[in-house]
Image: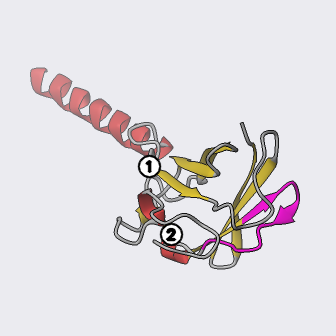
Amino acid sequence: MVGLTLLIGITVTFGTLVGLGTVGLLDPGASPDRPVRFSGSVSAETGTIDLRHEAGPAVDVRALTLRIEIDGQPLEHQPPIPFFSAKGFRSGPTGPFNPSADPRWTVGERARLQVAGTNSPTIAEGSVVTVRIDRSDRPLIRLDLVAD
C-alpha cells in the first residue's frame, strides 16, 4: 500500500512538472514556439533607443535587420547590427547590438544604440520612433515609441 501511494505521488509530481514545462511556466522565455515580445524607450535628449527582449526564444541578431523611422520618415542611415561604429550612430552600442557581445538576444537582455546628430531626421521630444525588426527579411516585431 505504501509503495502504491509513493508511485502515485511520483507520477503526479512528474506529470505536474511536464505540464508546467509544456505551457512555459517554468521558464517563460524558453519555449521556442512562444512569440517574441520586445519593449523599448527613446530619449530625445541623448538620441538613445533602448530595446528589451521581454519574452520568447533567444534571437540571433546576426539574422536581424533593424529599421528606424522618426515621425514616419526613415532615418537616412540605418544601423547595421551588430556594429561598433556606423555612419549616423554613436560608437559603442550595448548588448547584442555590439559585435563583441554574445549575438544571442535573450529574455531580459537590453540592446541600446544612439542616433548621432549627423543622422536625419533627428529625434525630438514627442517624436514617434518606429522600430521594425525583421528576421531573415520577415517581420518579427514593430514598436511605436514616443520619445521623452
Please tell me whether residue 69 belongs to the stretch shown in magenta: yes
Please tell me the numbered disc located at residue 11.
none
Residue bearing the label numbered 2? 61
Q: Is residue 67 above or below residue 5?
A: below
Please state the horizontal and vertical placement of residue 14, each as a whole percent of the image. 29, 38
Please tell me whether residue 144 belongs to the stretch shown in magenta: no
Write the residue at 87% across / 54% down: 71
Q: Residues within 10 Å of mark 1 (few under 14, many from 20)?
A: some
Q: Quadrant of residue 98?
A: bottom left
Write the residue at 68% across / 72% down: 78
Residue reaching furthest to the front: 118
Q: Is residue 43 left or right of residue 105?
A: right
Please tell me the numbered disc located at residue 109.
1
Residue 4 visible to an observer of this rendering: yes
Q: Is residue 83 above or below residue 17?
A: below
Please state the horizontal and vertical placement of residue 107, each as a whole percent of the image. 45, 48
Q: Secondary structure at mark 1?
A: loop
Write the residue at 65% across / 51% down: 47
Magenta-colored span: 68-79
The answer to which of 17 and 33 lies nearer the viewer is 33
Q: Amino acid at mark 1?
A: Glu
Q: Amino acid at mark 2?
A: Val
Q: Residues within 10 Å of mark 2 (few under 14, many from 20)?
A: many
Please state the horizontal and vertical placement of residue 73, each as a whole percent of the image. 86, 64
- Mark pair 2, 1: CA separation: 12 Å
Q: Is residue 59 left or right of residue 137?
A: left
Please state the horizontal and vertical placement of residue 65, each as a whole percent of the image. 63, 73
Write the residue at 71% across / 36% down: 148
Q: Secondary structure at mark 2?
A: helix
Q: Identify the image quadrant of the N terminus.
A: top left
